[in-house]
């Protein structure tokens, strides 16, 4: 699995499987990165909002694998929406991580988290932020640029005026919550879709219908969910600091049948993400 990649619109290769680091504490992240790289991961995903860029960077620098063999993603904070602030935040991420370049830089959200999916869509602000992203790309600070949590009209807003097209859109996409129309739109526009929380932040693990399908293939529900997203053409970035889970998440050498893919696409929409339901991406609201 570790050798399988997709090709971005600019020709850059990105591993299909990555390690997500959301909610991994700064003091744990460097060891999680080292463990993942030792196991075989070459794709690491972090963000300014995760507050662990420094530790992730330390893990990258101390993992024993050459920098050019790794694919590193970070994200501009959702609240940063003007040219100078985006430029400064990119420089800060590079400094915190101790890296000369970032492989993929993403705008974390079209709106600040406290206004996520609210009336103000920040269309003009996102165009300005994108200009700063394009400049970082041109200067070589980043090798690819993209979006996260952007709906179709958010993406269309960028496409309408950009010089360099977004290369990815990282979104919530998992069994029981798969935005198929948005995925199809992005793919038609040569924008690779990445799936965060591909195991529904654990909320799908006890789903009886999904477990029946997983048992059919002799795999865990987590493995089934990861394979499902990959067969939709998505990058998956499951989050874990547990080396055993890292290994299991990479054991995806099976193929889900077309019929079972249809079944999984139509699993009832998940209603409750448990203790993490307050996060905006899961339908909650930050105060």
Image (spheres, grey):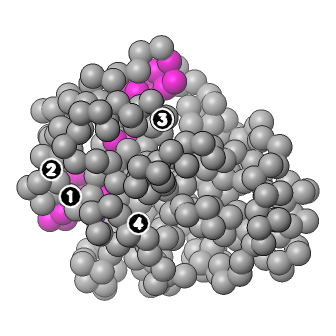
Residue 95 in magenta stretch:
yes
Image side of residue 249 versus residue 6, left or right: right
Specify which label sits upstream in the sequence, 4 or 2.
Answer: 4
Q: Residue at x 18, y 63 (%)?
A: 101
Q: Which residue is mark 3?
A: 152
Q: Is residue 187 at all visible to an observer of this figure? A: yes
CA distance separating discs 3 and 4: 26 Å
The total number of labels drawn is 4
CA distance separating discs 2 and 1: 6 Å
Q: Secondary structure at mark 2?
A: helix
CA distance separating discs 4 and 2: 20 Å
Q: Secondary structure at mark 3?
A: helix
Q: From the image, state whether disc 2 or disc 3 is nearer to you.
A: 3
Answer yes or no: do the residues labelled 2 and 1 have beta carbons within 8 Å? yes
Q: Which residue is mark 2?
A: 136
Q: Quadrant of residue 1?
A: bottom right
Residue 69 in magenta stretch:
no
| Residue 142 numbered tag | 1
């Amino acid at each position: 699995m570790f050798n399988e990649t997709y090709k971005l619109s600019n020709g850059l290769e990105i591993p299909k499987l990555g390690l997500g680091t959301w909610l991994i504490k700064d003091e744990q992240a460097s060891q999680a990165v080292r463990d993942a790289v030792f196991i075989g991961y070459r794709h690491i995903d972090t963000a300014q909002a995760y507050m662990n860029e420094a530790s992730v960077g330390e893990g990258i620098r101390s993992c024993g694998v050459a920098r050019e063999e790794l694919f590193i993603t970070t994200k501009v904070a959702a609240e940063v929406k003007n040219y100078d602030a985006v430029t400064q935040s990119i420089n800060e991420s590079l400094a915190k991580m101790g890296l000369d370049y970032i492989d993929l830089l993403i705008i974390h959200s079209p709106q600040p988290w406290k206004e996520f999916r609210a009336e103000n869509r920040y269309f003009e602000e996102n165009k300005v932020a994108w200009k700063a992203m394009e400049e970082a790309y041109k200067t070589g600070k980043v090798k690819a640029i993209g979006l996260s949590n952007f709906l179709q009209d958010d993406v269309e807003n960028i496409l309408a005026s950009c010089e360099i097209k977004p290369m990815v859109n990282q979104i919530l996409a998992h069994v029981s919550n798969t935005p198929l129309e948005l995925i199809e739109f992005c793919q038609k526009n040569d924008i690779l879709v990445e799936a965060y929380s591909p195991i529904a932040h654990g909320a799908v693990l006890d789903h009886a219908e999904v477990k029946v399908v997983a048992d059919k293939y002799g795999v865990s529900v987590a493995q089934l969910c990861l394979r499902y997203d990959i067969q939709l053409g998505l990058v998956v970035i499951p989050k874990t600091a547990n080396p055993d889970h890292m290994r299991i998440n990479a054991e995806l050498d099976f193929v889900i049948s077309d019929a079972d893919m249809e079944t999984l696409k139509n699993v009832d929409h998940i209603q409750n993400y448990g203790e993490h339901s307050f996060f905006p991406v899961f339908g909650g609201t930050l105060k």
